[in-house]
Structures are given as structure tokens and as C-alpha cells.
Image (cartoon, grey):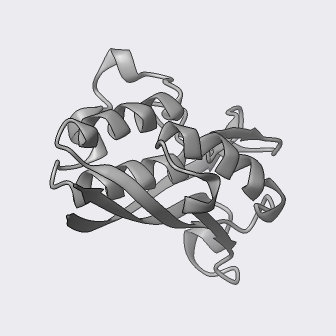
């Protein structure tokens, strides 16, 4: 059995007039994340971690922000496609450990729903999707509520 680990990171700016999508769900908030797609930083970090573990470059390579077909796309579609991409090389996700960094809104109440949405997209049990939330104690761009970032580590295996 081959076991590989990948790490992903993403950040998007918070702006007025956009919906806030995190972990595949829409969260009620005064601001949303700016991006070519729906700008779901958690899903983007998970995709990068999966692709990195499989040595398949990054999310921007496979789903470029210059592509009209990806404008406004639901990031859940990108996660499903990423799962299929690594499967084409014989890999499957074993587990995900991730962290969302945001001062507002509070993320913890939404974590179980995020897990339930993301797990089937990666063909794993809900228990295999760890999502944590933290603040940056009001430091940096996240602390000033200018943006949200996410980190993800993914373990993939090949029989």
C-alpha cells in the first residue's frame, strides 16, 4: 500500500455583496469571499492538499481562474472532480484534517453540516473529515476581518 500526505492553503478577501461559502455550505454573514469561483477557501485548501499528495500540481492548474467555465462555479464540483482526478491515479482519500481561520462569523456551529456535505464528495465517512476553527486573536488580515484562510492536510492511499 502507498500512503501519501498533502498540505493545502487558501485565502480569499472578504467583501460586501457576495455570499459566504465555507465547507460547501452558505453561511449567513454581512460579507462573502471574493474569487473567480464561489471562493470557498476550505474546499480549495482541501483540493490543493489532495492534488499535492498525488503529485498532481495544484487547484489553479486544473481549474484556472482564467477559465470562463469556472467563473462562479460551486467549489463542491471542484472537490468532486479533484476526488476523481486522484482516483484516476489509483488514490483515494483516507482522511482530512483542516482549519479555518476567521474572526467572524463563528464557524463552530456549522462544522457538522460542513462535514456531512464534504464527506460524500470525497467518498469517505463523516468521521474522516476533521474541521477545526480558530481566530488569529485580531492579528493580521484575518484579525482585521479582511479575509478568511484555511489549511488542510490530507492522507491518501493506493492499494
* Residue at the spot 77% in from the left edge and 62% down from the top edge: 104
Q: Residue at the location (78% across, 54% down)?
A: 110
Asked whether 71 or 3 is in front, the reply is 3
Q: Position of residue 93 (x, y in %)?
A: 38, 53
Left or right of 53: which side holds 27? right
- Is residue 38 left or right of 31 when viewed as pictured? left
Please tell me whether residue 99 is drawn above or below residue 87 in the rendered image.
below
Q: Nearer the viewer, residue 8 or 116?
A: 116
Q: Which residue appears at 33% of the width and 32% of the height?
A: 65
Residue 66: image quadrant is top left
Q: Which residue is nearer to you in this view: 80 or 3? A: 3
- Residue 22 in percent (x, y) is at 64, 47
- Name which residue lies at 65% across and 40% down: 117
Q: Position of residue 124 (x, y in %)?
A: 51, 49
Q: Is residue 105 above or below residue 144?
A: above
Residue 129 in view: no
- Residue 25: x and y, percent? 70, 39
Amino acid at each position: 500500500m502507498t500512503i501519501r500526505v498533502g498540505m493545502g492553503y487558501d485565502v480569499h478577501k472578504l467583501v460586501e455583496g457576495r455570499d459566504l461559502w465555507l465547507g460547501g455550505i452558505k453561511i449567513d454573514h454581512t460579507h462573502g469571499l471574493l474569487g473567480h469561483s464561489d471562493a470557498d477557501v476550505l474546499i480549495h485548501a482541501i483540493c490543493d492538499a489532495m492534488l499535492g499528495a498525488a503529485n498532481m500540481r495544484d487547484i489553479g492548474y486544473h481549474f484556472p481562474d482564467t477559465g470562463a467555465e469556472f467563473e462562479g462555479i460551486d467549489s463542491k464540483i471542484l472537490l468532486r472532480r479533484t476526488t476523481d482526478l486522484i482516483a484516476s491515479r489509483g488514490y483515494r482519500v483516507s482522511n482530512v484534517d483542516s482549519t479555518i481561520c476567521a474572526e467572524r462569523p463563528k464557524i463552530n456551529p456549522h462544522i457538522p453540516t460542513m462535514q456531512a456535505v464534504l464527506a460524500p464528495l470525497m467518498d469517505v465517512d463523516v468521521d474522516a473529515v476533521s474541521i477545526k476553527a480558530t481566530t488569529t486573536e485580531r492579528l493580521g488580515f484575518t484579525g482585521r476581518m479582511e479575509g478568511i484562510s484555511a489549511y488542510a492536510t490530507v492522507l491518501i492511499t493506493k492499494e
